[in-house]
Image (cartoon, rainbow, N blue to C red):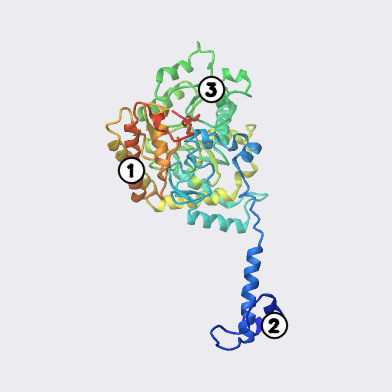
């Protein structure tokens, strides 16, 4: 406000000054204050009083407690991998408040992050370019009553990049994509048996092969079986007529690799399945867009019949894909029903297009592999004197091997205390720099010193109240 506005706001300035105990004269016998000076002081005093009396109402977010979260959300999370029990409780933060690049914040604590949103964050948290593309689409609408041309643009791009892709159907989650692929395979072959090799979400046909089978009809156990990656004899047994679980296999669904890949095994599986009338589905929800050539099938020069994609393809914005050869994808034009209102959601589609545009223009995958190799080599040098302790896997997705969960817990404990966040899901994103990796290695070196000093009984070095991290369903 200018001087005239201040005076106009306080026409009874003499009374207000007296009430607020504001002197009319300047200190040090410097004369009487002007109207403007007195009115300005009145304004300042009133502002101080208003601020002092302000009632601060916490936001709904600030009022959230873990106890309340557990009351309204089963286990407090939307996916098992985020449960406190999967980390070093209570040292790990319960909530993440924000992320940028390869860093996340819980309150005022900052961490270098390696779970990368369970593998969904490829470029880095809150990538400005992807955010801009999404915001632009938000202003133009995100879902309509008819298809949008961007659906075709993205489908064309996937057909160009993914070897087996001739047609594409968009969905939202990885489980939806694998469910659709299984349904298509069953429709195409007229068979029902499924051989699983890896982690494929929470659908009944997969869940019945795990310990998490409550709520699934036990009759499904005759339709699905789980094989160990690399075990040819186990795969052969699944196709044996003497096997009561699998008599007519519709498809083998497999992660082409989890940590380490076996190119010869991949080729053998495809040939064996085809020789026995079954299809092969690559679950590339995790490997897609992190692997050299955008997919494991491109990197290893193998051709599945169907492929599932998701997670990183839109840098963490929800979208998934089932794609494959036209003769199989054509099943969903008939009585094989795969349909989703939000399959055509343009937030995920615009984010995926921008992410792929960046992947094609910049050395994203090369950088991820280089930083992953730097982390892997650095840790394995640090831990070379610790028995059975090393970082394994391809550079884009690594795993800490330790003699026990107690040893892993102590390692993670010492890292999280120093600002480095590890988990069973462990990745590199484009925002990780050499500086981030080297800082991480410095922290790992200190953590390994603690681990070495307490090798015989690592739990004796646990902080008060620490509970060992427990393995996830996806754990190897």
Upstream in sequence: badge 1 or badge 3: 3
Label 2: state its secondary structure.
helix
* Mark-to-mark CA distance, 1 and 3: 38 Å
Farthest bottom residue in view: 31
First along the sequence among labels 3 and 2: 2
Q: Is residue 172 left or right of residue 256?
A: right
Q: Quadrant of the C terminus?
A: top left
Q: Name the residue under label 3.
A: 209
Quadrant assignment, res 30: bottom right
N-term-proximal mark, 1 vs 2: 2
Work out whether residue 258 can be spotted.
no
Name the residue nearer the viewer: 114 or 27. Answer: 27
- The structure residue drawn at horizontal position 27% and vertical position 31%, both measured from the top left corner, is 385
Residue 290: x %, y % from top left? 42, 42
Asked which secondary structure carries label 3, the reply is: loop
Tell me the distance, in whole angstroms, between the alpha carbons under discs 3 and 2: 84 Å
Q: Please tell me how many numbered marks the rendered image carries.
A: 3
- For label 2, the residue is 14
Mark 3 closeness class: few <14, some 14–19, many ≥20 residues within 10 Å? some
In terms of secondary structure, where does tag 1 sit? Answer: helix
């Amino acid at each position: 406000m200018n001087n005239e506005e201040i005076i106009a706001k306080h026409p009874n300035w003499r009374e207000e000054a007296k009430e607020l105990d504001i002197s009319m004269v300047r200190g040090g016998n410097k004369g009487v204050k002007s109207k403007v000076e007195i009115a300005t002081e009145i304004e300042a005093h009133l502002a101080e009083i208003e601020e002092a009396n302000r009632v601060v109402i916490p936001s709904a977010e600030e009022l959230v407690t873990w106890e309340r979260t557990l009351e309204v959300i089963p286990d407090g999370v939307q996916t098992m991998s985020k449960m406190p029990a999967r980390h070093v409780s209570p040292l790990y933060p319960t909530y993440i408040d924000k992320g940028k690049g390869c860093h996340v914040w819980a309150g005022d604590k900052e961490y270098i992050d390696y779970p990368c949103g369970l593998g969904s964050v490829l470029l880095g948290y809150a990538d400005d370019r992807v955010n801009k593309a999404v915001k632009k689409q938000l202003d133009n609408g995100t879902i309509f009553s008819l298809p949008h041309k961007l659906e075709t643009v993205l489908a064309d791009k996937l057909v160009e990049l993914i070897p087996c892709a001739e047609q594409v159907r968009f969905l939202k989650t990885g489980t939806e994509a694998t469910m659709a692929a299984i349904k298509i395979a069953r429709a195409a072959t007229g068979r029902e048996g499924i051989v699983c090799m890896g982690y494929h979400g929470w659908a009944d046909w997969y869940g019945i092969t795990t310990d998490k089978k409550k709520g699934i009809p036990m009759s499904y156990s005759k339709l699905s079986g789980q094989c160990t990656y690399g075990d040819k004899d186990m795969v052969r047994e699944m196709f044996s007529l003497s096997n009561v679980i699998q008599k007519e296999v519709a498809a083998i669904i497999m992660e082409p690799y989890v940590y380490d890949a076996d190119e010869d095994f991949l080729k053998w599986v495809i040939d064996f399945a085809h020789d026995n009338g079954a299809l092969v589905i690559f679950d590339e929800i995790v490997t897609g867009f992190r692997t050299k050539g955008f997919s494991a099938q491109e990197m290893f020069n193998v051709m599945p019949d169907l492929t599932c994609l998701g997670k990183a393809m839109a840098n963490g914005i929800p979208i998934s894909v089932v794609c494959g050869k036209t003769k199989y994808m054509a099943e969903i034009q008939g009585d094989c029903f795969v349909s989703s209102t939000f399959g055509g959601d343009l937030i995920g589609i615009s984010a995926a297009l921008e992410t792929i545009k960046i992947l094609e223009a910049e050395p994203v995958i090369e950088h991820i592999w280089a930083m992953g190799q730097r982390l892997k080599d650095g840790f394995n040098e640090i831990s070379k004197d610790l028995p059975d302790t090393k970082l394994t896997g391809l550079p884009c997705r690594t795993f800490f091997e330790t003699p026990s969960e107690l040893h892993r817990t102590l390692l993670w404990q010492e890292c999280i205390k120093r600002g480095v966040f590890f988990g069973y899901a462990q990745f590199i994103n484009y925002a990780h720099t050499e500086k981030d990796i080297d800082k991480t290695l410095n922290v790992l070196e200190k953590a390994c010193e603690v681990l070495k000093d307490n090798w015989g009984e690592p739990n004796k070095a646990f902080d008060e109240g620490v509970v060992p991290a427990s393995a996830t369903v996806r754990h190897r």
